[in-house]
Image (cartoon, helix red, strand yellow):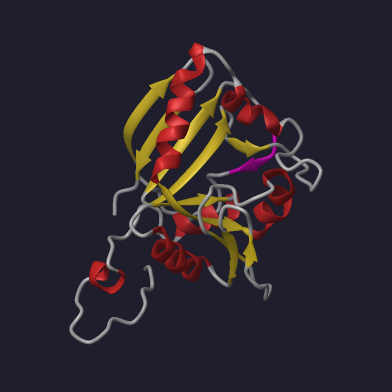
């Protein structure tokens, strides 16, 4: 269950605490057909692992044939109010991003005691625990979407039933190994509802709702 801040006396709804509605929690990943969201041997020099860069190639195709993918990316960007990510994702990604991954407040799940890191677009805040990071992210998002990055954090969100939706950009490649998203999220089956499927010349965009 999502832990919320103590309610002031007489307040009965979350929107009245923050003045806004609670934003959806969305896992969004580019994934190979065999289920990998990164290749093997992830490192500081190879943030997506061996062969993993192929998963994001769809973002960089030019020309009118890429209008579907660019339109989907812009649509998501307009919704994002905050990000929750794992420490490993932060460690390998920062040098490549040179900023927060999205131009919004970003909350890094870690046991390390680190001070806030101000960047050009927003800041990284380091938080102990997935639920506390999500609390802070939803407050900062002010009703907009909270994006979750990193396999471990996403799996914890699924296991604790904290996520609302999953966006998958399905890439027509077989990586053969690497990091999977759909592991370690509990033994019970998790039924999803496919809410949207959009094909482009390069990938298939899939949107799933997670029933509560």
Q: Residue 171's x, y, as percent?
A: 56, 25
Tally of numbered discs: 0
Q: Is residue 71 above or below residue 155?
A: above
Image point 57% across, 56% down: which residue? 85
Quadrant hosting residue 76: top left
Residue 153 lies, in percent from the top left, at 55, 57
Residue at 45% in and 54% down: 158
| Chief secondary structure of the magenta portion | loop
Residue 116's spot in the image, x, y percent?
A: 62, 69
Look at the image and say whether residue 121 sits in the magenta stretch: no
Q: Which residue is the extreme one toward the right?
A: 45
Q: Viewer-proximal residue, 87 or 69?
A: 69
User: In the picture shown, does residue 81 fall above or below 199?
Assistant: below
Residue 176 in view in this figure = no
Q: Is residue 176 above or below residue 152?
A: above
Taking the view exactly as shown, the residue that stands out farthest to the front is: 120
Magenta stretch in the rendered image = 175-180
**Depth order, front residue of 92/187:** 92
Rendered-image quadrant of the N terminus? bottom left
Q: Is residue 36 left or right of residue 91?
A: left
Residue 212's x, y, as percent? 29, 54
Residue 154 in view here: yes
Name the outermost residue toward the bottom. Answer: 9
Above-or-below relation of 30 to 142: above
Residue at 50 percent across and 31 percent down: it is 169
Which residue is at a point 28% across and 81% down the rendered structure image?
A: 7
């Amino acid at each position: 269950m999502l832990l919320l801040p103590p309610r002031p006396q007489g307040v009965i709804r979350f929107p009245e605490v923050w003045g806004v509605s609670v934003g959806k929690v969305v896992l969004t990943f580019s994934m190979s057909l065999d289920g990998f969201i990164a290749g093997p041997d992830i490192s500081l020099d190879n943030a997506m692992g061996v062969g993993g860069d192929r998963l994001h190639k769809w973002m960089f195709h030019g020309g009118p044939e890429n209008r579907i993918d660019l339109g989907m990316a812009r649509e998501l960007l307009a919704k994002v109010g905050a990000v929750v990510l794992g420490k490993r994702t932060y460690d390998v990604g920062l040098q490549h991003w040179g900023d927060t991954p999205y131009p919004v407040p970003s909350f890094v799940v870690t046991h390390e005691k680190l001070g806030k890191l101000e960047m050009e677009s927003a800041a990284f805040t380091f938080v102990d625990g997935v639920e506390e990071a999500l609390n802070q992210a939803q407050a900062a998002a002010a009703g907009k979407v909270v994006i979750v990055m990193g396999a471990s954090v996403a799996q914890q969100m699924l296991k604790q039933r904290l996520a609302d939706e999953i966006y998958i950009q399905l890439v027509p490649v077989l990586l053969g190994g690497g990091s999977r998203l759909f592991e370690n999220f509990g033994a019970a089956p998790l039924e999803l509802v496919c809410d949207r499927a959009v094909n482009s010349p390069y990938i298939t965009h899939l949107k799933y709702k997670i029933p509560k």
